[in-house]
Image (cartoon, coloured by chain):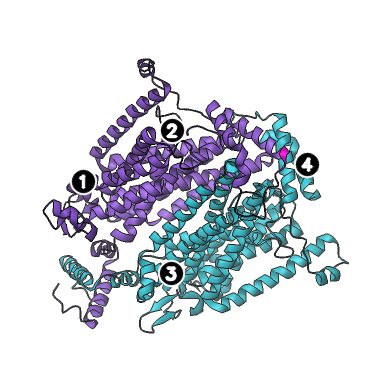
Chain colours: A purple, B cyan
Amino acid sequence: MSELRHRRGEGDGNDKVETAGESDHVDVDSEEEKVLEEKYVDELAKTLPQGTDKTPEILDSALSGLSSRWRNWVIRGIFTWLMIGAFCLLIYGGPLALMITVLCVQVKCFEEIINIGYAVYRVHGLPWFRSLSWYFLLTSNYFFYGENLIDYFGVVINRTDYLHFLVTYHRFISFSLYCVGFVWFVLSLVKRYYMRQFSLFAWTHVALLIVVTQSYLIIQNIFEGLIWFIVPVSMIICNDVMAYVFGFFFGKTPLIKLSPKKTWEGFIGGGFSTVIFGLVLSYLMSQYPYLVCPIEYSESLGRMTMDCEPSSLFRLQEYTPPHFLQPLMKLSGREKFNMYPFMIHSLALSIFSSVIGPFGGFFASGFKRAFKIKDFGDVIPGHGGIMDRFDCQFLMATFVNVYITSFIRTATPQKLLQQVYNLKPEQQLQLFYALKESLENRNILNMVP
Amino acid sequence: MSELRHRRGEGDGNDKVETAGESDHVDVDSEEEKVLEEKYVDELAKTLPQGTDKTPEILDSALSGLSSRWRNWVIRGIFTWLMIGAFCLLIYGGPLALMITVLCVQVKCFEEIINIGYAVYRVHGLPWFRSLSWYFLLTSNYFFYGENLIDYFGVVINRTDYLHFLVTYHRFISFSLYCVGFVWFVLSLVKRYYMRQFSLFAWTHVALLIVVTQSYLIIQNIFEGLIWFIVPVSMIICNDVMAYVFGFFFGKTPLIKLSPKKTWEGFIGGGFSTVIFGLVLSYLMSQYPYLVCPIEYSESLGRMTMDCEPSSLFRLQEYTPPHFLQPLMKLSGREKFNMYPFMIHSLALSIFSSVIGPFGGFFASGFKRAFKIKDFGDVIPGHGGIMDRFDCQFLMATFVNVYITSFIRTATPQKLLQQVYNLKPEQQLQLFYALKESLENRNILNMVP
């Protein structure tokens, strides 16, 4: 706590200067209001989880000789490697293991965010608040996971009569479930707590927006091929770690007021490391069909498969380097070089993850500061809560998803054909003749396929 | 104000009784905290817009002889009819006029919600807050309206080279725009205001969730055929009006603590009126292709069209009434009767609009009470703000949209064919041969089309 208070003290002098922007409303807060607010926020800080100091005892005693700065370094390092190891294990476990992990992480993040909401709005006495927020988590997961499964495995699911019903009326069922929650909320309103109940309702929905919708996008990325999940996640980790390392050793120039520990040196060093790391990782990973192939249902095998003829993104191509790199190439005695086209996309991803990605972290640390908490939770020694480690991952996942839909996935004949097979036979036939006529009219049918 | 204060006084005695639910946290708010909160909320009420008393002067003097209860009745009545008239004019104006109206209503609703947020979080001095919330409104509208236009008119838009770019990279552009707003928000954070800035950020996003996403669904409904827009909107209006009328004349039994003016008599009377009104309206409207046909791009005409062969939903069919209605039918001397299948769907819609619909209103009135405001705005004399009239419309629109996707719209050969035409010619050919082979294998190709 003392550290936080200290930080607050530092900048109080120049607050007025920063209130630029809409200059017609400069500052009309009365002194009294300010005091009230400070008091409230300080009260709040006492009730919120403060985490992070929960180090396993054995580790604690083994490190007792180190200064606190180095001690933190070591603990953080150990648990970083532990997490990286767990991550590799999960990849080995395949898409199902990853899907389940995403779900667990999501639930944990939701819990951390919502717990802060509980503390902020002093929920003691609010009727049904806990059940309601978990109910909304459940329904929104039902909706989003269902949408994903239907999107990718609709044909398979439709074969089972019972599931067919769930697929056809999926949105209706989800919406009905949501309506139950909505009515429940309205009925649970109690005059004395109106304001806090509505605030918590909004808080829950923002948490859902951040956590559930984005983990839905993560699952979509996994289905597109494990590489679309592993590379971005690793990039964010690499950027986090390397920014920390560069900042630790070379950090001098503060980057942003919000996070006094972040430095320009860390930002830039982390960025360069991430770009290089991303290129190497993409090169290595592009070689394995297991990582590169989308997860699809194979009609001939009658099961899910991750075997495929890798798309052109993952086949080596010859590139002529741009002019300014030619001298460098001459040194190596070659004029052209081979690489996977995916590596170009990896470059885009790594630039995003090191330029915009950190803002996810700034946002989270601003949020923590707003409510005067140090970490979101205390699950990982040296790191804080799950949300502390995944703050940037969510933004990144959305970027990857948007990137794929915009630049990678174009409507393929295969996908469309799947949809055609979902039609009734006579409709399929109708479509066939209409297509035939159109192709004939445009003189395409005479082309060699 | 006095009315509101009076209401607050009424129920304070039995607050404790209502805090059921999670019984392990009964009530630990200190007296002091309670007083602080009361004071804050009362202060708030002074700064918030209180609206509704803005009656045109001519009307005001003409009605000076009436008691305030009847005066309110007359003013409300006059403006109800004015609004219904405007609504009819807009329908005559066609889908484009309606789309623009939806956009305007949406912007106005957003403004009303966000203004309350400004007052609640005393935004004076917060940097950039106004520009930021409007920027987010702009980007989310760009995203959602774009998605709609691409979905329905992709083939047409793709013909123009310049627009083709906007279509292909639509999500990427929208996401980039959002990221700009996100980074802007993070950079605008000022230590002293963290908590309020984050609260306002959340407030803005909840407003977007309520207003923008749902108006996106309304536009989709309009594209499915004007009837899917007019009937639900009219139902909500009818339910509102008739519940008010029944409540005014027969209301005795209070329905819900949240809205002391709502009565069971109004709820039930409004419900029955809505069901009957819905059936009659659907019967009348099903006869006009202009109201019934989806808006589509016609290849042969080279323009948008609302002409079509009405789908089976809008063609008279013969029904045998269920057993318990047979005696009634015998009176009329017939055993069967004709009606449009759409009327059955209309029944589902009217039941939703009169059972769940009002909860949208309760939610809004709870929200208003939470922040001690009487109305969202003062645009419509006797009615308050736009948001006061549209609170139930949003929930209803979502229901209609979900209803259409679940029960009405199945993948049609036409829609799929549109997507096929978006492929490259050689891909179209590839799909054609694959489909041909599959149809031959399943012995479907030999069927008569």
* Number of the label disc, if any, that sits on residue B9: 4
* Number of the label disc, if any, that sits on residue A385: 2
Q: Which residue is mark 3?
A: B149
Q: What amino acid is at disc 2?
A: Gly
**Residue B449: in sight, yes or no?**
no
Q: Is residue A403 left or right of residue A299?
A: right
Q: CA distance from mark 3 to mark 2?
A: 42 Å
Q: Which residue is mark 1?
A: A285
Q: What amino acid is at disc 1?
A: Met
Q: Magenta stretch?
A: A26-32
Mark sitting earlier along the chain (3/4): 4
| Residue B95: % across, % down | 51, 74
**Outermost residue toward the left in this view:** A333
Q: CA distance from mark 1 to mark 3?
A: 38 Å
| Occupied quadrant, residue A24 | bottom right
Q: Secondary structure at mark 4?
A: helix
Pointer 3 chain: B
Q: Secondary structure at mark 1?
A: helix
Pointer 4 chain: B
| Occupied quadrant, residue B388 | bottom right
Q: What amino acid is at disc 3?
A: Leu
Mark sitting earlier along the chain (2/1): 1
Q: Is residue A150 above or below residue A79?
A: below
The one nearer the camera, A68 or B425, is A68
